[in-house]
Amino acid sequence: MMFAANVFVGPEIDWLKISPLLVMLGGALFLILAGSLTSQWKPGVYGGVSAFTAVASAACTAWQWNELGDGASSELLANALYFGRFSLFATFSIAIATALAVLVATDYLVRENEDGPEVFALMLTAALGGMVMVQANDFVVLFLGLETLSLAFYLLTASNRSRSASGEAGLKYFVLGGFASAFFLYGVALIYGATGSTNITKIAASLSSETVFAGSTGMLLAGIALLLVGFGFKVSVVPFHTWTADVYQGAPTPVTAFMGSVGKIAAFAALVRVFTDGLLTRSDDWRPVVIVLAVLTLLTGSVLAVIQTDVKRMLAYSSISHAGFILVGLVAASYGASPDAHLGVSSSLGYLFIYSILVIGTFGVVAMVAGKGDAATSLNAFAGLGKSHPVLALAMTVLLLAQAGVPLTSGFVAKFGIIRAAVSVESYALAVVAMLAAVIAAFLYLRIMVSMWLSDRTHSSEISASLSLKVAIALSVAFTLVIGFFPSLLLQFVDLV
Amino acid sequence: MSIPILTLLVLVPLIGALGVSLLAKTQESMTKNVALVSSIITGALSVWMLIKFPSGSSGFEFVSKHSWVSEWGISWHLGVDGISLFLVVLTGILFPLVIVGIDPHHHHKQYLVWMLILEAGVMGSFLSLDLFLFFVFFEIVLVPMYFLIGNWGYDQRVYAATKFFIYTMAGSAFMLVGIVATAFLARRDIGYLTFDLLEIAEKANFSVNTGRWLFTGFVIAFAVKVPLFPLHTWLPDAHTQAPTGGSVILAGVLLKMGTYGLLRFGVYLFPEAAVWAKPVLLTLAVIGIIYGAIAATMQKDLKRLVAYSSVAHLGFIVLGTFALTNQALTGGVMQMVNHGVSTGALFLMVGMIYERRHTRVIAELKGIQAVAPIFAGFFTVVMLSSIGLPGLNGFVGEFLILIGAFSTARWWVVAATFGVILAALYLLWAYQRVFHGEPDEANKSFPELTKREGALLSVFVAAIVFTGVYPKPMLNRIEPSVKALLEHVEMRSDYQQPEIEAGE
């Protein structure tokens, strides 16, 4: 009998439910193994395999969504993973964003003569880490996902060996990211100390009844604060945003697109899940902090975006402003007592999905204009684009208008969702601040549009792109417009989250 | 209703825009024809709608309603009543005139595409009976107008276009939050989430404070659009820098989206708050009237002068709106159309002057009457209509506003009357400097109107004279809706119109 107690009993594994993760893992391993054992493949084949992997993972997720139907959420792998519409939607967003970003990267790597399996394997690995983050039901698992994602990101940022800016950005990101991970881990440790568990569901249970909760409140609050710092760094919330502009600018443009989409979805979805599921009972404590962070992020991001002269830096700051919008969604979700609190969660996820596709399309255009060596990213490089490349300029215009939140684009649907969530819990002032920040940010998008349409071409660099990049841009523009005109196509899923 | 005429009013220009954008750049005459045909069809549809519109009806006609975003309770709900009727017709007629009559000089194809998208947006704004749908149209209008000013405008066009965009968008930010809040708060009374204007206006019962806050949110957006003092500073820039076609549309119909919005979404949705805010809005309107007139007098640029005169005229419309009497409100609605016709025509003629002389500076123009008498004649008629001379359209509207507002806003009316005098001052003085005297060297060769320009202006003058001499058909269609609106206000607030209506 004594002996039997020491026998390791493995958790029951529901293979189908974790199939999206397995597909991603399989794709990454296949690329590394097959790629290193064979001679160089034809241009674009590495990318094709990766895109296929991402789409297959998305298909698995969609299938699981269908299987789940109206069913309740559950926990997998001995409570390590959470399985529900929230995690499925976030996983799906990551898979789709990965597929699009891979298309952008394929064109870039072929152009720079750096085609190979490494970058793609890293992208799939990062996506896998992101998926683990959004599905994690345990802080330790969440940290594993976060580190998988982050390490892959550091390498991707530094992946362009011929550009010193890329290496510099990678190092910066690594050092600062390391700090953030430490903050995060410290936060987890303190929360464990206060509640006695790292499992999000169990933490929620232990916090829900005051009598059971015997831990130290001070320790818990410090833990929550440190968690916020760690997450805040990852999603670039002011005042933890300082790395963003440098890293966005220094990283190869497709990697920037990838970070701006998958990195945001993963970290934000995990943040929302931890705070609205695990720590919801303490929302009165963290809500004021999040409100302050949201206002700071919205205003700082928008204002700093306006004064930049490099398009990649502009978009980096605008991504900060967008992060502020999603924080508004988190604030709305924090009113657990309100019957409309779920709107905050679903609108945040919808915003993330819509924004990632916008951001990949936008950076796709930037990658195309930047040309060989990823050099031409200043605002001047866009001057006169409307005259020399009207279709490309039109695509960029649609994407920028969507980022500004103009109606009949997906960006408006996203913003409207957040405003609706904020208003439903009567956070009127916050909603107004968010909209005003969007107006300030609109000035930035107008600046790029003015440069494209109303100036004369000064740069003579050639602009060309392979099919994969064109497909990526076309898909994101099509998505932007279709969702803009028929929001129901997306909302029927988002509202179920 | 067999033909969804209102939906067509929005869709036909859009289809035209799509058609134009699909044509090659080289097929210049073809692009123009497609644009013209689609805008003429729209115009014809709007006139047909005017003919079919039952005189004396106070409700919404030709209603078309389809679900759009059912998850959010948003529907494609269009309808027209006496208040929006003539604005729709004005839009329908003004656009083909602008497209046929004004040459953008370069990039014809893109110009026409933006014009047609603009027309669809403006039409949609006047027809929407759903708050969300209205916002979509109201906001989408910014994009074509931004490009029209930015691409085809004058020297400072980028500055002006950006200012226009940011100003209006900032106003809309408040309205969007207001719209969502309205729908959510109305849900408590209605039982489900809907953005339908009529349902909310009839069923929702906002508490006094809530209503006032929401009203303020809407009013900020419309005050920028109108524009109401002190939010008017974008207007002189946008007007002056816009190409002639853009200015005509901007003055003709775009500004009316603000005054129309005040009526449809301000007064109708929040009657109590409208009564409460009356003194403030009346004061701002009167300041606008006087300030606009004084500023117009001081302008050196003819186009800027007309732009400032718009500030003054729109002040009159707001005065009529918030006087909250049948007569003043009817006058206000009428003046929206009149101002569109007169100021549109004035901008058209300033554009013609610029085409000929490449300057709009008043000091550089002189004695044009001697070399171009027909042009001067047309200018005189339009100018007098803008001043409000009896027998022309401007008089009817302005007179109704002043007489109607006298009982409820006496001192404001007294102050506003000075605006009428000032209007005569700045326009006549400008006329004197530009048209009278001996033409100097530069102005001696000022060409007379071409036949095409003459035909174009004749349409405006015909409308000016007809409305001035025989306003009854127009008033008959506006009044029932205005009465219904004010009855709604009286029912929903403790406000009562003074019973001193003169007999028929």
Image (cartoon, rainbow, N blue to C red):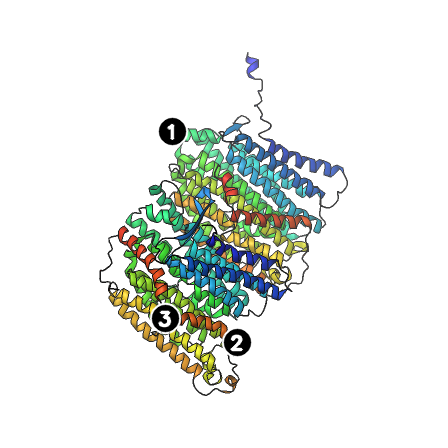
> Residue A108 location in percent, x, y?
67, 50
Task: Check disc 3 and report the residue beneath it.
Answer: B468
Asked whether residue B366 is in view, the answer is no
| Between A474 and A444, the one nearer to me in the picture | A474
Tell me, yes or no, whether dots 2 and 3 are on the same chain. Answer: yes
Left or right? Give the position of A448 relative to B399.
right
Mark 2 secondary-structure assignment: helix
Mark 1 secondary-structure assignment: loop
Instruction: Report the amino acid beneath label 2.
Output: Lys
Task: Check disc 1 and report the residue beneath it.
Answer: A209
Instruction: Report the amino acid beneath label 3.
Output: Gly
Task: Check disc 2 and report the residue beneath it.
Answer: B451
Give me the disc on residue A460: none
Report in which chain the residue with disc 3 lies.
B
Q: Residues within 10 Å of mark 3 (few under 14, many from 20)?
A: many
Query: Looking at the rendering, which quadrant does residue A120 occupy?
Result: top right
Instruction: Report the amino acid beneath label 1.
Output: Ser
